[in-house]
Image (spheres, grey):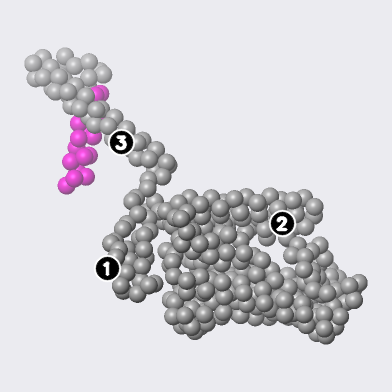
Amino acid sequence: MSDLLTWSPIHLGRWFGTTVRVHISLIVFVASLLVTAPLEASRGSMAFHVGQAFAWSALFLLALALHEAAHALVARLVDCEQEDVHLWPLGNLVGPTTQSRNTNYMLVVVAGPFVSGTLALLVAAILGFAWDAQFAWHPLGKDLDAGAPWINGTVKAAPMTAPWLVGWFGYINYLIFLANLLPALPFDGGRLFRWFLANTAIGSARDSMVAPWTARTTAAILFLVGMVRLLIGQRWDGLTIIFLAVLIEMMVRSEARVLEDGGYFDDGVFGYDFSEGYTSLESSAAKVRPYRESAIKRWRRRRSDQRRQRRIMQEVAEERRMDEILDKLHREGRSALTDEEHRFLVRVSARFRNRQNTQD
């Protein structure tokens, strides 16, 4: 519960051998749609009344389930073990993990966006043939009913009609497809980009700064786009895009913490890449990424060392001064001590007694 990146309270069992959980962000997202729908309806909004909110939520969950089922099904078909799925509004909230160099892993990653994109194209074809309607291709439409298709290219489909439902289903798949093309975690594009880095001369995504800097560049671009959307009055679109930028930055920081805590094993669990079978043990040895201490940790360590050194020097000086005062007390008596020497004697003696009591 303390880590919002992994808090998935609802367990949906195993899909084609892959454990699937519902992330807290998906619960909050759907709940907010259903809770705010009556408020929008009371204000006279025809785009988001209660019935539409339930229908839209059902279409959204169906599109999301098909996207993740494609990942799980292909993973089972090619016998590639997949990480646990944490369903969030744009797919699987996957964080930084060790990446397999196997081609099967790439097929599993591509399966989700492929299904979402194919469904969007299929819906666009159905709309054109069945209702002479035009698919809403603009991912950042200004209309409240942005996903509804255009009938005869002039008017939006009426809410809750067949073309409206089909059009919105395709539009949701279209948005999921586009979002998962981003070359940054937690999106499928980020996983695919890291697989590409691990299989090219650029080097492993874990051993270079290409992946995190690409992710941060993506986050910066999204943040700027979100700010522009806010300035032109598209509040919800702008906030959503800014949220995606912040999420990507959180993923990069999470990966940095993993590296600071000891890094990755170069080739998978215990230093070996089992994606090619157990024969990989014969040609590779366990290699652990050397620990990298961050600049902040180095600064804190230096400050701690300096404080400890000053404390040791102070204790040595106090012990020397204590010996001098005790020698004077022994030779000349208590009346010979100055007020400052007397206070010093009382203070250091009390500190010494407290230290002894603590050790006991």
Residue underneath mark 3:
305
Left or right, 215 with respect to 347, comes to right
* Total residue callouts: 3
Amino acid type of the residue that numbered disc 1 sits on in the rendered structure: Glu
At 8% from the left and 16% from the top, the residue drawn is: 331
* Magenta region, residue range: 343-360
Residue 51 x/y as whole percent: 77, 80
Residue underneath mark 1:
282
Nearer-the-camera pick, 274 or 264: 274
Residue 62 in which image quadrant: bottom right
Q: Secondary structure at mark 3?
A: helix
355 over 234 or under it: above or below: above
Q: Nearer the viewer, mark 1 or mark 2?
A: 1
Amino acid type of the residue that numbered disc 3 sits on in the rendered structure: Asp
Q: Nearer the viewer, mark 3 or mark 1?
A: 1
Any magenta on residue 269? no
269 over 262 or under it: above or below: below
Residue underneath mark 2:
238
